[in-house]
Amino acid sequence: MCVRCVLRRRSHYLCEHCHRGQFPMDVELDIENTGLSPGVRRMMAAVGQEAAFAHGRQQMELLAGLSVSTKAVERTAEAIGGDIEASSLKTTPARNAATATPVKTGQPAPMVSHWKLLAEANLDSLF
């Protein structure tokens, strides 16, 4: 994987109604309101979840040659973690019920040896 700075020209559009500017390519590349690519954000989240954020900053410099702040590692790791948690909470109740571990209720079923069952069975009635 190659990590480097990329300079690019991009179109800027101004809304004539609200007078807010927008960069459609930023949305398409998933870099809107950030200077980091999705791959770099995933890397920062990975190093941020493994150890202290300061150590994650050092790992980014060592592994990717990127100079980022400790706070940037912290914010990115927490934002991605929050996104993962939010998406896991959006599962449907039917899916949760289908994948949930059953809970025991009432009296447990008696455990009986299959040999005992065979001994007690009336095998003559089968033939």
Image: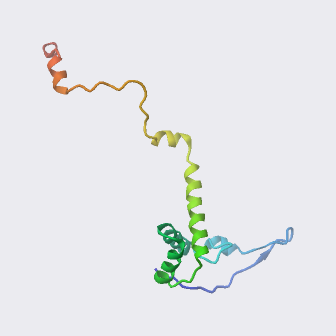
User: 55 and 20: which one is in front?
Assistant: 55
User: 24 and 62: which one is in front?
Assistant: 62
User: 122 and 9: which one is in front?
Assistant: 122
The residue at 57%/49% (across/down) is 89
Answer with the quarter of the image where residue 4 lies: bottom right
Relative to 73, does residue 110 appear above or below in the rendering?
A: above
- The figure's colour scheme reads rainbow
User: 67 and 92: which one is in front?
Assistant: 67
Location of residue 113 in the rendering, given as x and y in whole percent from the top left corner: 20, 27
Left or right of 108 on screen, residue 59: right
Location of residue 121 in the rendering, given as x and y in whole percent from the top left corner: 17, 17
Query: In the image as oriented, which residue stretches furthest toward the right?
Result: 17
Location of residue 7 in the rendering, given as x and y in whole percent from the top left corner: 63, 86
The residue at 69%/81% (across/down) is 10
Number of numbered discs: 0
The residue at 50%/76% (across/down) is 55
Location of residue 81 in the rendering, given as x and y in whole percent from the top left corner: 56, 61
The residue at 43%/28% (across/down) is 105
Left or right of 30 on screen, residue 53: left
